Image (tube, helix red, strand yellow):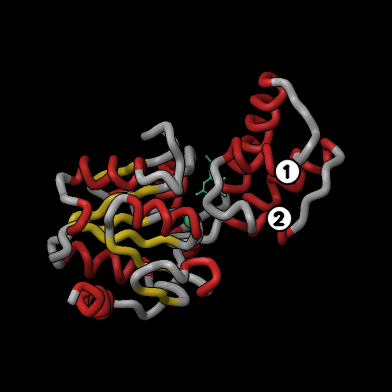
Amino acid sequence: DLQGAIFDLDGVITDTAEFHYQAWCQLAQEEGLPFDRAMNESLRGVPRRDSLLKILGDRSASEDQLQAMMARKNEYYIRLLQQITPTDLLPGTLALLQEIRQAKVKVALGSASKNARTVLNKLGITHYFDVIADGYSVERSKPAPDLFLFAAQHLGIAPHQTVVFEDAKAGIQAALAAQMWTVGLGPQERVGAAHVVLPSLARATWGQIFRALGQKAT
Ligand code: BG6
Ligand code: MG
């Protein structure tokens, strides 16, 4: 049975995509590079460095220039994060976290973001997490299974007793590669590979998710 739950952050617990968009937009504008919402959508779950390389396209840059641009984007992003409050929790998130903890299931964060702790603190939900795996935890990013395996290991729970909540294609791939159960949040074309697909966590209950995954197991 399920003993652990791992939540992605951006796009699952809160919607930071708009802040990432604004921060990348500012950098792209300053650098004279094209950037739009469609491109931002393709950066969902993609680490900072890979995101920058995508935006640069065939424009070449030295390692120092890359580092400086990443630092600048993050400065803009952190500035935007200051406005986050508990009201920015996506609908259903808090109720589900509470229900999961009541069921004595362990909870971890599994996010590629180096700003994950800041965001959890701003949302006021840090105390719900037994383990925080973030952009500092492992080398290889999603779709590699490393981050989720790290989280489960620190929870002390086997992968096949763990369920991952994800909104990104690479995140679902990572969880499946880790041999974990998956709940995909969003459209089929993005998270259709997950065991269970929901539009969002709004009105989602642990009991309902547990039963839906149980049906897949038989
Ligand atoms: C992911 C986001 O969670 O974290 C990506 O979906 C982001 O958009 C990545 O690029 C890295 O985040 P950060 O905060 O370390 O730049
Ligand atoms: Mg995400």
* Residue 181 x/y as whole percent: 28, 63
Residue 175 vs 96, above or below: the answer is above
SS at mark 1?
Answer: helix
Disc 2 marks which amino acid? Met
Which badge, 2 or 1, is on the more N-terminal residue? 2
Which residue: 30% across, 50% down? 178
Confirm or deny contact between disc 2 and disc 1 (CB under 8 A).
yes
Q: Is residue 140 left or right of residue 25?
A: left
Q: Is residue 85 visible?
A: yes
Q: In the rendered image, which residue does mark 2 sit on? A: 39
- Where is residue 41, by image quadrant? bottom right
SS at mark 2?
Answer: helix
Q: Is residue 199 left or right of residue 24?
A: left
As drawn, the residue found furthest toward the right would be 32
Q: In the rendered image, which residue does mark 1 sit on? A: 55
Q: Is residue 161 left or right of residue 188?
A: left
Q: How many neighbours does mark 1 have within 10 angstroms: few (below 14), some (14-19), or many (20 or more)?
A: many
Which residue: 67% across, 39% down? 52
Q: How many marks?
A: 2
Q: Is residue 128 visible?
A: no
Which residue: 50% across, 59% down? 168
Q: Nearer the viewer, residue 148 or 85?
A: 148
